[in-house]
Amino acid sequence: MKPSDKYLFNSSVFIIVLMMYRNSWFPGASFVESFDVYFITGIGVFLLLLNFDFNNLFQLNLNILSSRSIVFTLLTTCLIVTVSVNKFYEFSQLWYLVRFLCFLVYFFLFFVSLPKILLNCKDYFFKFIKFFSVLGSYVAIFGLILFFGGIKPAPAYGENFVSFCVHPNYISFFLTTTILCTLLILYQKSQFSPFLIRFSLIGIFLQYIAQLLTFCRAGIIGTSLAISIFFFLHYKKKALIIIPLVAILIVSFVSSFIVAKGNVSTVSRFLLMVPAYNMLVESKSAFLWGYGPTYTFDAYAYFRDFFFIAEKVNNPHNTVVSMAIMFGVLFTVIMLFFGGSLLFKGSLKAITVKNKNENVIYSFLVVILVGLFVQGLFDSALLMPEYFDMQFYLLFLGILYKLTDKKPTKILKEFFNY
């Protein structure tokens, strides 16, 4: 691995950890919040320039007439129109501009560059998985000690598991990711030490218990659904026996955590859709092109107050709806088609491949994207660069994108040979 690739790998992990600290109750978190997107944009641009490949600008393996080329051309066009239709409002303030650039940096860093590095050097792929799996276990242990010790670092959510975070929804997204990373370790034993395998058996149990204690329904449903789909893709016909057992477990045990919060939050989530709906139907321009990734917050706050919505948040807590009001319905439909097609291809690969390693990797990539997306239907964090969810989603989507290429390179073929 080239030194520049190592810098990019280590810096990408650092960015994720920094965003985790930014959303924690630890000392200095508010200070990190004051410069987060500025720092990420700056370091991201530096890393991209350091790894710039003039021979293959985007490393997306596109050709002019391919469906992938058409999709990226349409998405780029929609983004340009969104910015121009909204009178370049995203460039009117420094913070707006930097945050807009942060979206682009994340795309090139986590969707384009990092997947290429991890696929070229599979040891680093498994090192990434190991790091966040182990971190997830320690986060769960730390949080469970606080929870059962009666220590409430986030008093507003005293009855919920929060660990290092200031909100149970934040830690729930992280646990969804780390639980599935730990699951991958348990099914790729040849890549990890016997000690780590034993530690992961305990870790995945503790992480799932922690997920339940967040009482975050979206996280519990997303994680449970993802694990069920993994069993189906991996065991295939045998899953007809396993999945009903998992379903019984969920209904008899997990469901009590899902309904524990009652119906209040469900009603509040529904009410948050009212401002978003009215934003979209205000004009044809708003419907097609949205309000921009940052000005959206101001527009949403205006409509929220106009309709006397009691919950003072600046987004509808739904990734799809948030994408629509940010970038427009046209961009959102194309993105859903693009993501859905990759999930379909990945699922088909997982079911049809005979190589066990391929099956496990494809199954993992599909379920982690599904789990996070399902959770994103109840939260907008996947579209917020200030959090630590978008990075994971773009990374695993980028890896799946490259692995499902019709003409895989020699390097991609070697990725499964171990």
Image (cartoon, rainbow, N blue to C red):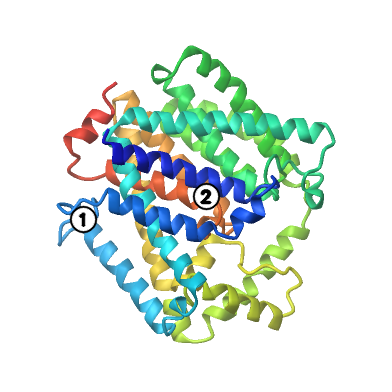
Relative to 81, residue 416 above or below: above
Residue 73 relative to residue 200: left or right: left
Label 2 amino acid? Answer: Asp
Among the 4 quarters of the image, the one containing residue 134: top right
Residue 217 percent coordinates (x, y): 67, 48
Mark 2 is surrounded, within 10 Å at the Cα level, by few (under 14), some (14 to 19) or many (20 or more) other residues, namely many
Tag 2 and tag 1, C-beta contact below 8 Å: no
Instruction: Give me the residue at 70% from left, 49% from top.
Output: 166
Image quarter where the N terminus lies is top left
Tell me, for residue 57, which label it has, or none: 1
Q: CA distance from mark 2 to mark 1?
A: 26 Å
Residue 263 relative to residue 297: left or right: right
* Count of numbered circles on the image: 2
Of the pair 242 and 90, the residue shown nearer to us: 90
Among the 4 quarters of the image, the one containing residue 49: bottom left
Among the 4 quarters of the image, the one containing residue 408: top left
Tell me, for residue 13, which label it has, or none: none
Q: Residue furthest right?
A: 150
Residue 334 percent coordinates (x, y): 36, 65
Tell me the mark number nearer the camera, choosing from 2 and 1: 1
Of the pair 148 and 33, the residue shown nearer to us: 33
Residue identified by numbered label 2? 389
Secondary structure at numbered mark 2: loop
Instruction: Work out whether mark 2 precedes mark 1 in sequence or the reverse, and give the earlier one.
Output: 1
Residue 271 percent coordinates (x, y): 69, 70
Secondary structure at numbered mark 1: loop
